[in-house]
Amino acid sequence: MVMGMVKWVIMVTVLGFIGWHFINKPIKGPKISPQELKELLDSKHAEDEIILIDVRESDEFSENSIPGSISIPLGDLDTSTVLQEISKESQIVVVCLSGCRSEFAQQMLLDMGFKHVYDLSGGLANWSSESESSY
């Protein structure tokens, strides 16, 4: 009887964990390719502003960044006062070096209520290689 109870407890625990995992699984936001971003930046009017947020550390940002981007390191994103000045309806593109930190930042911004947040596919490394090949 005790062995049956242990099996039951283990089964309920495993099922609960699996259910929790699927319920709490973050929804990945949309990605934008470097080429798509360049086209948007070239065609947008001032009233249709795209906000570029670079979530790399300050020293990385100072070495190389996309012109017009705002530096908000990932560790400061949830406490940044800059975000208070940005409309939840703004089009935001998050950038890092390879796309890992920006994917996390994208999820954070979506969780904060921002509606249109895109992750630059491949990060700044991909942006740089696209820039060299297209210009």
Image (spheres, helix red, strand yellow):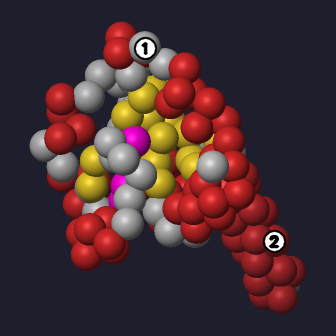
Q: Spot the residue most to the front.
A: 135
* Residue at the farthest left position: 81
Determine the secondary structure under disc 2. helix
The relative height of residue 129 versus residue 37 in the rendered view (above or below) is below
Please name the residue that numbered disc 2 is placed on: 11
Q: Is residue 1 above or below residue 40?
A: below
Quarter-of-image position of residue 81? top left
Label 1 sits on a secondary structure element that is loop
Residue 58 in sight in this render = yes
Q: Position of residue 84 (x, y in %)?
A: 18, 33
Magenta residues, as a range? 52-56
Residue at 63% in and 60% down:
132
* Front residue of 79 and 119: 119
Marks 2/1: CA–CA distance = 57 Å
The answer to which of 50 and 19 lies nearer the viewer is: 50
Q: Residue at x 76, y 70 (%)?
A: 14
Amino acid marked by disc 2: Met
Q: Name the residue rendered at 70%, 70% in the picture.
A: 13
Q: Is residue 124 magenta?
A: no
Residue 40 location (% of width, % of height): 57, 27
Which residue lies under the disc numbered 1? 45
Q: Amino acid at mark 1?
A: His
Q: Position of residue 49 (x, y in %)?
A: 39, 22
Number of other residues with Cα within 10 Å of mark 1, as a class: few under 14, some 14 to 19, many 20 or more: few
> In the displayed structure, would residue 110 be above or below residue 16?
above
Does the image show residue 20? no
